[in-house]
Image: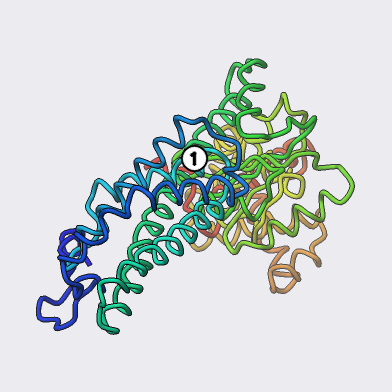
Amino acid sequence: MSETQRERGTDASPDTAFPTYPWSVLPPGLSVALAPSVPTLAELLVREISTQVPQYTGRRSDAFWAGIRQGVEQSLHEFLELLGESRGPNQRSRAIVRGLGRNEHEAGRTLDSLQMAYRIGARHAWRTFAEVATRENMPTEQVTAFAESVYAFVDELAAESVAGYAESQAAAASEQERTRGLLLEALTGPAQDPAVIRRAALAVSWTLPERIRAITTTGGELRTIARGFGNDALTAPGEGDEIVVLWPDPEGPGREARLKLALSRFDHGFAVGPSVPLTLAARSLRGARATADLGVRGVLGEGPWRWDDHLTAIGLSQAEEPLLELADQLIAPLREESEGSRARLLATLEAVLDAGGNHGTAAHALGVHVQTIRYRLGRLRELLGPILDDPSRRFELHVALRARGLAQGPMAGSLQDRRR
């Protein structure tokens, strides 16, 4: 239902034969008989609420209760004005009770107290108005509609208060996310200001730990991930669509098991950086991002990907530029080979180097006969010369080819291709 339709008291279909609000069937003249009871009823409601609702008892000033009394009177008069009308409470009344809901959240209370106040109001309003209805000799069907109208009107106001509470809740959550982002930036930025870090941590109720692991992902929703990792972790927006988690006290008792459990709750990729002192949080985040880069390229297999488990691959990837240049230099003599021959020779060379020179192991890895390995090695010696017999040069070749393989992972082209 649109707001305009709601104000008019009509359903989405203009042809409906039934009124939206129960008070629309009541005689408008009834408000004249009920109006004199409003001031006394308002006084009664304020007194009952101030004494019966624990959260409000003795906690407010006379000025506060005077304002509440005025608001109650206005609401009661509006209810009387609605009798015989096919519309709901006006925008001003809705705004007032929506503000009550926001106030409850800002005061750190649940909606229980306000809902109790609404119930007290509905009960006493019906009792008071029912006496007048009896004196007016209202027909039974109108008395029934009148009772329904009182409670329906209070429900309308209560629903607006719930909406106001939710608005305040959402605004507070957004502010918390913004402040957590500022704290993450302060911890991982180029210049750490202890005073700024302390203030931001206090604002989000995060106890600054001695050590952390940074965790990064680009999948999922921030609040869902925050719930998954718990309140003791700092979850905040990172760069672009990245979400960053700072996992505190990673070496503490049971902390590794808890981290594994948190990671298992999600089906998208997380990368876990090294454990570092809090002052080196930027280093852990760089490590997590480097790990994530290889993970999403398909180099590291199934996630979650942990820095600790892939140090060789990460180290090679971080030296990718010079190692690729070295590989290009070392295997330059193979450029004259056909594409298929070059691929077979390079696969053989890597297999032999990985096997520590054992031809049988290399043949098994490639699924070829050992004589094939020997034949291809002969061709490689013709092309590369003495490099295969020099331990230092052989080591360089092995490392460079490993880096080249990482750059040409299963989900990405070579670095040279990506440059083009």
* Neighbours of disc 1 within 10 Å: few (<14), some (14-19), many (20+): some
Outermost residue, left direction?
Answer: 15
Q: Residue at x 39, y 42 (%)?
A: 69
Q: Return the x and y of residue 279 as percentages of the image width and height.
A: 72, 24
Picture layout, residue 315 above or below residue 41? above
The kind of secondary structure element at disc 1 is helix
* Residue placed furthest toward the right: 253
Residue drawn at x 25%, y 82% as measured from the top left: 139
Q: Residue shown at 71%/59% (left/top)?
A: 351
Instruction: Give the quarter of the image for residue 377.
Output: bottom right
Instruction: Specify whether 215 is left or right of 34.
Output: right
Label count reads: 1
Give the quarter of the image for residue 285: top right
Determine whether, in the image, residue 289 is placed left or right of residue 209: left
Q: Is residue 405 visible?
A: no
Residue 110 vertical placement versus 191 (above, below): below
**Colour scheme in the image?**
rainbow
Quarter of the figure with the C terminus: top left
| Residue 24 visible to the viewer | yes
Residue 68, position as x, y percentages in the image: 41, 41
- Relative to 114, is 386 on the left or the right? right
Circle 1 sits on which residue? 172
Which of 114/248 is in front?
114
**Viewed as shown, does residue 240 lie left or right of 306?**
left
Residue 379 versus residue 417: which sits nearer the camera? 417
* Quadrant of the drawing holding the N terminus: bottom left
Q: Position of residue 380 (x, y in %)?
A: 64, 52
Q: Nearer the viewer, residue 139 or 360?
A: 139
Which amino acid type is shown beneath numbered disc 1? Ala
Q: Position of residue 327 (x, y in %)?
A: 59, 40
Say above or below: 282 vs 263: above
